[in-house]
Amino acid sequence: MRWYPELEGCLARLLDRPGAKQDAELRALLLVGLYQLLHGATPEHAAVSETVEAARALGRPRAAGLVNAILRRFQRERAEILAAAHGNRAAKYAHPAWMLDAFARDWPERWESIAAAGNVEPPMWLRVNARRGGRDAYRVRLADAGLAAEACDFAPEALRLAEPVDVHALPGFADGDVSVQDAAAQLAPRFLGAGPGMRVLDACAAPGGKACHIAELEPGLAELIALDVDAARATRIESNLARLE
């Protein structure tokens, strides 16, 4: 979905009749194939062959030749097709036009770098449990485990790992010493400023990161209610709170 505007722009230039009504599943499959060729880690020959086989698996054996032809043409004419697609700003920067306009209005000298940053793979951020020790102490524990991390200058409990890892490789994760949460999301509980004796309602809580952070920062709450409209996701709230107890 991140690259949808770019993929759509490329596909429009690969179809003989780009405006014609098309099979929605087949169109989605072609977009997935283009994604693999542009941004995926799958070898190109495998991406093409698997996308062709997927057309047959979807019950469209007659479309297999079309899928193969379109993807192989993209391989041959990649530079020209991308250049044409990138003539549209939304396709080039993979952001909606209205958002690019807002960036350009508010940060006229930086809007392109802002858009580029929005497409970078996000880092893995940790939230150190304030009840279990300080951020600096946990950073030492990470170093002892061979994991490098940097502190965040605006989120006091946040550490950014140099490389993402499985959560079970994090020291004390199972015991609730640390959680995975973006640094920006860690600002919300501090903006709330909950104090002793207060009652807090997190009305859209799943999976429970902010609710857990609130409880970590203020153990003297009178009551903390965390709920979510999705019952299945709400179970994540319970498991996360239980891990932090």
Image: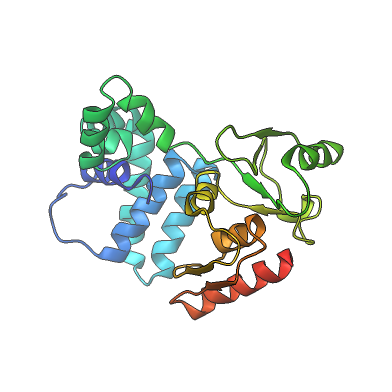
Measured as percent of width and height from the top left, residue 146 is found at: 82, 37
Task: Please state which of residues 5 and 142 is positioned toward the viewer in this rendering.
Answer: 142
Measured as percent of width and height from the top left, residue 10 is found at: 28, 41
Can you tell which quarter of the image residue 173 is in?
Answer: bottom right
The number of discs equals: 0
Can you tell which quarter of the image residue 236 is in?
Answer: bottom right
Measured as percent of width and height from the top left, residue 31 is found at: 35, 51
Taking the image as shown, residue 153 lies to the left or right of residue 9, namely: right
The extreme bottom residue here reads 231
Taking the image as shown, residue 101 lies to the left or right of residue 73, namely: left
Query: Which quarter of the rendering shows the C terminus?
Result: bottom right
The extreme top residue here reads 109
Task: Please state which of residues 59 and 135 is positioned toward the viewer in this rendering.
Answer: 135
Visual colour scheme: rainbow
Measured as percent of width and height from the top left, residue 235 is found at: 59, 76
The extreme front residue here reads 197
Task: Please state which of residues 225 and 42 is positioned toward the viewer in this rendering.
Answer: 225
Asked if 82 appears above or below 133 in the picture, the reply is above
Q: Is residue 204 visible?
A: yes
Task: Please state which of residues 41 and 244 is positioned toward the viewer in this rendering.
Answer: 244
Name which residue lies at 53% across and 41% down: 122
Name which residue lies at 73% across and 67% down: 243
Can you tell which quarter of the image residue 225 is in?
Answer: bottom right
Q: Is residue 85 visible?
A: no
Name which residue lies at 29% across and 33% down: 92
Asked if 237 appears above or below 81 in the picture, the reply is below
Name which residue lies at 61% across and 57% down: 213
